[in-house]
Amino acid sequence: MTNLKLTKLHMSRLHHTELGQLIIRFIEDFEALGKDASQDEDFKKSFDSLKEQIAVYKLALNQIRGREETKKIASYDKERDVAFQALKNLINVYKTSTDPEEKDAYEQLATVLNTYKDLTSQVYEKETLNVVTLVEKLRSKEYASSVKLFNLKKFIDKLDAANTQFNKVFSSRSQKDVQKTTYEILPLKKKLIDDYQTLALYVYASAQLKKTPFYTEILAIINNGRKYFDTIITIRRKKKKNGEGDDDKDNTGEMPQTPPEETTI
């Protein structure tokens, strides 16, 4: 029989989502084997615990993603607010104009914008609809001459584009129920790592001692997952070394909060 080994993996270098993927992959691969976990009660207890933990861990990851979505939405909202203010500023340049044509154009446009004076303080959905209405008005024949006189087309287009981009991001946000429970990713991640490590070592030791298919096949799927994520870590660190990426940036959008010690087995 081939000498049995446990593939090394620097667990502390896994991003939040990668750890979740590793555990989920192990659970799914084991279930695909069709083996009865109750053949080993200690294994079953640890395996069931991982399944329970990963369910909570996924909720914690969703909260992180939700915070990132909120930041992104706020950023795009600010962009359209800036575009609206730029339009107002350009029109206000003509506020004191003595040219009759410019005075008339200013009065017409200022009257329209005055009805949207609280636009940037409105709730997201209402602001989106009002920007659409404003853009439609300014693009209508009624205001065509004034818009042309003040060269506003570019600014109107920018406002429209910013509003469209905001609505695209806002509409695609995660449609999840608001969770009353706040999850701390660090302690959840640490326990998940510790329990996974313990189970992996238990399977490895059992495979060496008993050499039965139950343990050797489980060890094989554990090693497959570990090898895959070890490769990901290696590639990421090489990219960082070459200045092509950030090894410390988590793929949830946040800096990973991993235990300070290096964890490898």
Image (tube, rainbow, N blue to C red):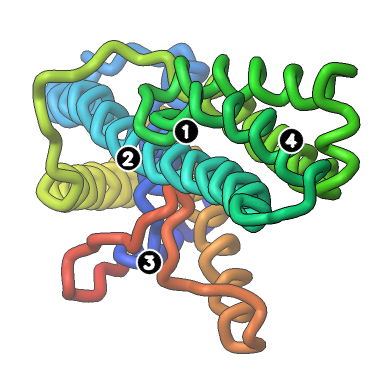
| 143 displayed left or right of 92 | right
Where is residue 252? Give x, y as percent: 43, 48
Residue type, label 4: Asp
Residue at 60% from the left image edge and 50% from the top image edge? 95
> Residue 211: in sight, yes or no?
no
**Nearest the eye: 65 or 153:** 153
**Secondary-structure class at tag 2:** helix
- Determine which residue is flagged by label 3: 13
Disc 4 from disc 1: Cα separation: 68 Å
Q: Which residue corresponds to mark 4?
A: 104
Residue 144 in the image: state x and y as whole percent: 88, 28
Under tag 4, what secondary structure? helix
Which residue matches tag 2? Answer: 67
The CA distance from mark 1 to mark 3 is 18 Å
Q: Quick one: label 1, few (<14), some, or many (20+) residues within 10 Å? A: some
Marked residue nearer the N-terminal end (2 or 1): 1
Q: Which mark is residue 221?
A: none
Is tag 2's residue or tag 3's residue first in the polypeptide sequence? 3
Q: Residue at x 9, y 24 (%)?
A: 181
Residue of label 1: 25
Marks 3 and 4, how far apart at CA:
65 Å
Instruction: Tell me if mark 4 has few (under 14), some (14-19) or many (20+) residues whose alpha carbon lies within 10 angstroms of its own.
Output: some
Q: Which residue is more in the foreground, 265 or 240? A: 240
Mark 1 and mark 3 lie on one chain; the one further toward the N terminus is 3
Quarter of the image holding residue 45?
A: top left
- The quarter of the picture where the C terminus appears is bottom left
Which amino acid type is marked by label 2? Arg
Local SS, label 1: helix
- Residue 55: percent from left, percent from top: 26, 23
